[in-house]
Image (cartoon, grey):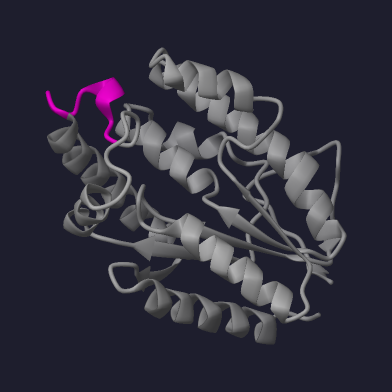
Amino acid sequence: MHSVDFYGAGFPYNPIKELEGKLIVLEGTDGVGRSTQIQLLRRWLEDEGYAVSDTGLHRSPLTQAGLESAKNGHTLSPLTMSLFYATDFADRLENQIIPALKAGFVVLSDRYFFSIIARDIVRGADPDRARSIYGFALKPDLVIYMRSDVDSLVARLVHGRGFDYWESGMDIRCADNIFDSFVIYQGKLIEQFDKMSDEFGFVTIDATRSVQAVFGDLKAQIKNLFERLPE
């Protein structure tokens, strides 16, 4: 059991002083391989005897259906998108993440509010205001920034699932075609993640390497966390 810290006031109506579990966040741009690593980490941690829960953006039952419908129709304004994701995050934090941590689970989060901030700023939000929204957020025990360059992201998607409308920033028309828009948009996101890295204490790893090489680094960082924190 260890003490709890928030980025602001937390949930004033739900004071929390100690939690049994550990919150581990993987951050990074679209197509960097977070989902694959979450699956590998979950399997490894369960084999090591830990109870594991995983979560990620737009998985809240409160917002998931509406968000997916709006995204599929390409009808989200930047403000609407921001509010959807903030609501999604708050609901998952209060009703999924914190209860799992109270029960002693290791919670693996595929992104956290840092991704939402990066997206909001690239779409014109004030950086200070974007950060101030998330004063209720629990500080993770470990945030690992899987950093890639745009060329590596492009190569993965060209030979993989292809380019997505939202991941390419087509809603804000970074360029008049999806390829160039992706390059510009993801470059802007990387700039925001790099700025947040020191501010929020990210551990940065090179995500341009093989899946197994990245997995090895992730395991080493998590083992180090377990050694540092009290059981």
Q: Position of residue 159 (x, y in %)?
A: 23, 53
Query: Residue shown at 55%/23% (left/top)?
Result: 67
Q: In this view, does 196 lie above or below 24?
A: above
Give the position of the N terminus as an image quadrant: bottom right
* Residue 174 in magenta stretch: yes
Quadrant location of the C terminus in the rendered image: bottom right
Q: Quarter of the image holding residue 78?
A: top left
Q: Is residue 138 left or right of residue 119?
A: right
Residue 174 in which image quadrant: top left
> Is 54 in front, or is 129?
54
Total numbered badges shown on the rendered structure: 0
Q: What residue is at 27 percent from the left and 42 percent from the top? A: 162
Q: Residue at x 36, y 56 (%)?
A: 32
User: In front here: 156 or 136?
Assistant: 156
On the image, the x and y values in percent for residue 226 come to 68, 81
**Residue 17 can be seen, yes or no:** no
Is 23 colored magenta in this rendering? no
Residue 134, by quadrant, is top right
Residue 76 coordinates in the image, percent (x, y): 43, 16
Please determine whether, in this image, residue 73 is positioned above or below residue 192.
Answer: above
User: Which secondary structure is most common in the magenta stretch?
Assistant: loop
Asked if one can make out residue 207 in the rendered structure from this viewpoint, the answer is: yes
Q: Residue at x 32, y 57 (%)?
A: 194
Q: Magenta span covers which residues?
A: 168-177
Give percent across and percent down for residue 60. Answer: 67, 34
> In the rendered view, does 147 fall on the left or right side of 129?
left
Left or right: where does residue 214 sit relative to residue 95? left
